Image (tube, coloured by chain):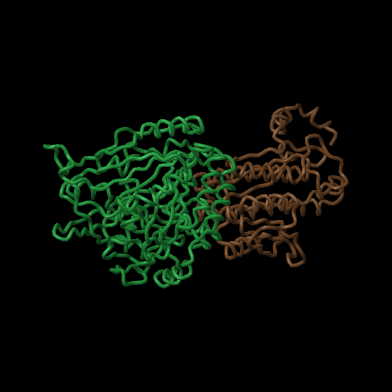
Amino acid sequence: MRNALGSVDTVLLLGGRSEIGLAIVERLVRDGVRRVVLAARDAAGGVPPVIGAAEVHLLDFDAARPETHGEVIEAAVKLVGDLDVVIPAFGVLGSQAAYDADPVAAAGAVAVNYGGHVSVGLHAARRLREQGHGTLVVLSSVAGIRVRRANFVYGSAKAGLDGFAQGLGDALHGSGAHVMVVRPGFVIGRMTEGMSPAPLSSTPGQVADAVIDGLRSGAEIVWVPGLLRAMFAVMRVLPRAVWRRMPR
Amino acid sequence: MTSFLTGWGRTAPTPARLARPGSAEQVAELLRRAPERGVAARGLGRSYGDAAQNAGGLVVDCTGLTSWSLDETTGLVTAAAGVSLHDLMAALVPRGWFVPVTPGTRHVTVGGAVAADVHGKNHHVDSSFGAHLRSLTLVTADGESRTLTPGDELFWATVGGMGLTGIITEAVFRCVPIETSRIRVDVERTRDLDHTLETMTATDDRYRYTVAWIDLLARGGRMGRSVLTRGDHAAREDLPRGADPLAFSPRSLLAAPRWAPDGLLNPVTVRAFNEAWYLKSRPGSLVQGLAPFFHPLDFVDGWNRVYGPRGFVQYQFVVPFGQEATLRRIVSRLSAEGVVSFLTVLKRFGPGTPGMLSFPLPGWTLALDIPAGQRGLAGLLRAFDERVAEAGGRVYLAKDSRMSAETMAAMYPRLAEWRKVRDGADPGGVFRTDLARRLRL
């Protein structure tokens, strides 16, 4: 349960090796979370340790197999009770050139980045609605706010996810459960290794800090860094001919 | 009907379906059809935290259970759980009786008073509410109505059990005879914390009712300066001739505004208030009505709104006698941090009841209100929790809204015993509250 000062007790991280996800969990534990469930592919094969939690549980989870997602949420509830914060943090980036060459791989990536989140999100939302409290943290991206030529497969999946998350948040309105949409820009980390950072990039730790602030204040949408919100207000209305020429 | 509920501190609202039964049979009927997310009992919502909330489940509003009777020869009152102490007093006082224990507000129900095993200014002499109970009627998870007496384990799991053993529908307790509706009060001011503790230790036993109000914002040599008010029921000869000795018609004089901004209570306003209060409380004796003596805050309807939309946290702990060092450290830390608390109250407790989760134990109890938005509050209170637990003390569940399950277990050594009795009465876990989930009871 969320207490009077905004601290929570349990967290479920789906994509248990995600840098951003683990950075959020680490901060939640520092803030008072005692029970952590990490769901990851081949969970037994090793997940980074979470320091300071009273209980850390591991569950096998495959984002590409939506038929198993309901069981994973149920198993997490069996382990720790009510889920205070649920963070689906799985995803694949991939290069646009590779997707252009391999449409099957592109469809697979979209199935994870969008389809996997839809399935996990709906299962989690059902549980949060029943329990009358809890927050689903959806890791969207500015890549989905206006999709660019340079990564439109990834961007379009994020666009879908962002719209899904907003709709789900509205559907849960009045139930006691919340959805928080997080829109980072370029995040410097394992996922973007070898790529040169875009302007207004951030680190997983900075994204996690923003998520913690947002959870505390009950924010519905969080931009990381905050300046991206103003920037994308402009980007969204740029003429197509200009947008098309954006370098990356 | 689904409603979002909070405690008196107005923090952490959660939705629940509300039902308001009019009889014990209707309570039993509701329990037979208990939903998956369980059932919680609620009275007038004066617990500060999440004790009477049940996210996603059913909350049984007991304020529809209002019948009661007084045996004028013995002073025994038989009251349904939803009767408020306010209503009882309004009827009992003119007939020459007073409730055995009253907390700082009259607006609590009998059921809530039992479930929290409430205490008042007479704890050092009369213990808590549970000590005055003859019997209880509890509707358990199976829908059966059971009458319990102090010889039953389940009785002492229910007294102070925060409503988690069943729904209390009736209580029988003994009231005290009074000659007048006034209190003869002695007021004294103390210089600092040591002086406060000394004076209370030396003089408490001379009075039935005692309490100290501490100015937490006073620093340095004045840290812990207090206003002590001690009193006894006034005798007829204490009143001016011609006064109606048992007149009692308490009501609230004003209502707090529907909305107050965050930060209305800040170091500046509270310091000014504390200073005024300290200076206004002139040492001496006076005769006061029951309501201003016991329930000064009841004069302002909805005073909890003054803390603004983010609400507030009440922190009340007790440490055993001999652990004054812990009390001193906490008071000096609060004073050093400039924690904005007005009406911080210090009280000496006498012996507790056998209630397994009852709060009071012989020692010092300090209660303070803090705006929930105060920076660094979570860490500060966590540090206090540890100190209190180490000293063999505990935090009051009826006021708690933020403790962790682990600290709570360290503070309540009889938790395992209580769980065993509770599991016997409620094997399926029908009774659930947000507090029980948070503290993993």
Identify which residue, A233 or B326, lies in the foreground: B326
Is B139 on the left or on the right of A7, as rendered? left
Q: Give the left or right position of residue A100, taking residue B244 as reference.
A: right
Query: How far from the left and from the top, in percent, is residue A2?
Result: 54, 51
Task: Report the label total.
Answer: 0
Location of residue A40 with respect to B282 vertically, above or below: below
Residue B434 visible? The answer is no
What residue is rendered at 61% in x and 49% in y?
Answer: A136
Q: Residue furthest left?
A: B242
Q: Position of residue B26 (x, y in %)?
A: 29, 60
Look at 59% across and 55% down and name the residue there. A124
User: Which residue is at a point 35% across and 55% down the rendered structure image?
Assistant: B124
Q: Position of residue A62 (x, y in %)?
A: 71, 61
Q: Is residue B250 visible?
A: yes
Tint applied to chain A in the drawing: brown
Q: Is residue B257 above or below residue B230?
A: above
Which chain shows up in green?
B
Q: Position of residue B145 (x, y in %)?
A: 29, 67
What is the quadrant of residue B249 in the picture?
top left
State the image quarter where residue B349 is shown: bottom left
Residue at 57% in and 44% down: A169
